[in-house]
Amino acid sequence: MQQPTQGPGERKKFTVAIEGCCHGELDNIYATLAHLEKVEGRKVDLLICCGDFQAVRNMDDLETMSCPVKYRDIMTFYKYYSGEKLAPVPTLFIGGNHEATNYLWELHYGGWAAPNIYFLGYAGAVRFGGHRIAGLSGTYVAQHYHMGHHEKLPYDERAVKSAYHVRQLHVHRLMQLQQPTSIFLSHDWPNLITRYGNSRWLFSKKPYFQKEAERGDLGSPPNQQLLEVLQPDYWFSAHLHVKFPAVVPHWQQQQQQQQGQQQQQQQSPGNNQKATRFLALDKCLPGRDFLQVVELDVQGPLELCYDAEWLAVLRSTHQLMSTSRTAPPLPDTRTGPKAEDVAFVEQLLQQRGSSSIPNNFAPTAPAYDPAAGRARGNMPRADLRNPQTEALLEMLQLPYNLDHAASSSGAGRAWVNRPAAAATGGGTAYRAPLNLLSQQQGNPEEIDIESDDSDGQPAAAAGAAAAAAAAADTFEIPLDDDEDDAAAAGSEGAGGALADGAPDSDNEAAKAAPEAGSSEAPQQQGRSAAAAAASGQQPSDLDDPMFGRVNTSEFPYYNS
């Protein structure tokens, strides 16, 4: 499928900044980018956030976020939603496990959460600079994976958590993508990813990860499937509040018949072998590795654009969406979108004259007013229809399918007059995801917030240099880096969920933000197992026999 693009102009490269868990710290993250530009002269063209974004517009939205009441805070997103501030750089984000779920549901297929701040959707793909950026919101829990999106406002205690759990439909949709993916985003890590990085270093820093990893369930099996099938150039994650790099080779397998047996021919990454560079990032706190900067070749317009193939996938799978507990069975082949849907989208974008995503943000709820104080809000009573979602579905000539009941159709739509929807045709489906390697009954790396823990009061952001670090996170008790924390975290809850009851020693250790550009990448204790295999030599004695090592020294880090 031909992806419409505009001329790249004279620029050869553009800069993307990737941030780990946002936790509502937009002011400090944007100040970090300004500090980086001042110190190093790097102007960021696109900011990507890997979940726990917390697009909280008002105190009512806080009631839909999975978080003990004592840790809820309005934070800073509302300023950008209300227009008090404008995001200084185009910002793209996915959802995590601490979100204003009611608002993200409005933008289920993606849309502007605020001017210049775009939600990729529960699953989605867009283009920037001609590169595909795809992603999956939420975290994986096996017992909810095959369900429909049955959670309906007002959420009860269970629904407020299960609402952000990944559903098979979204993985199925992403599996249909056939064209190359430059960047993939997820909140939780792909399963088995620790086998491709310095796991010894990781376990020394987070010892309570080791049991999960050795069992082969530290991470999301659907993410592992997507990694194996889509093979993106980069994969960025967050969630576990630690920086962890890895390089995943994608072996080119050539089946040969030799004496009645199939032979596999594998090549080492290095001889033009395809590989994915994975990086998990920390949350925005002083002295933490929460930011990564990469440069990509300019291949298209430096603005967010529709991905034509993804739009065709949405048309082809539209009828598979379920808002009940049961979901329809998924097709069992990976054939991509239907030819008629591909042709429809190509004609649509040609008629539009551009693949640019329209700047059609429209508020659907009032913004928080600081003068009104911080009295606890009320759980919203009904889903709202966002005019952006209506416009997208109208453009694709698809019926609206996010209402949980016929009686809720259009209820409380928008609190302001909506602009006319710019529109311009139905669908079918395919390919169920690969069989899961793990069927655990809970998310093994789900980080719970314990209501009896204390993470201190939010720290005030200070100055341009200190803006390189976020204030203390009051939304999630962070995993402690001390060995003593292993005992606190060792009491794994049902399903292997990690519980961290210790205060965050890093908050005390890093009062001031380090200078942007300082490198603090984990030192590799061995060399690349893949390179060793290619040379016929054995890996270093420091290489764990279970977890291979790869050299990521070429991966630049910013601990700004």
Image (cartoon, grey):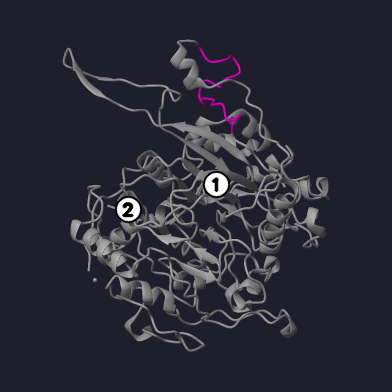
**What secondary structure is the magenta-colored segment mainly?**
loop
Q: Residue at image x 49%, y 16%?
A: 532
- The segment highlighted magenta reads 538-554
Q: Does residue 57 appear in this view?
A: no
Q: Where is mark 2, residue-wise?
A: 172
- From this viewpoint, which residue is outermost toward the left? 260
Name which residue type carries label 1.
Glu
Which residue in the protein does label 1 denote?
Answer: 445
Q: Is residue 349 above or below residue 185?
A: below
Amino acid type at circle 2 is His
| Local SS, label 2 | helix
Visible residue check, residue 53: yes
Q: Position of residue 165 (x, y in %)?
A: 46, 58
Residue at position x 62%, y 45% in the image: 292
Q: Residue furthest top?
A: 537
Does 38 sit left or right of 413 as displayed? right
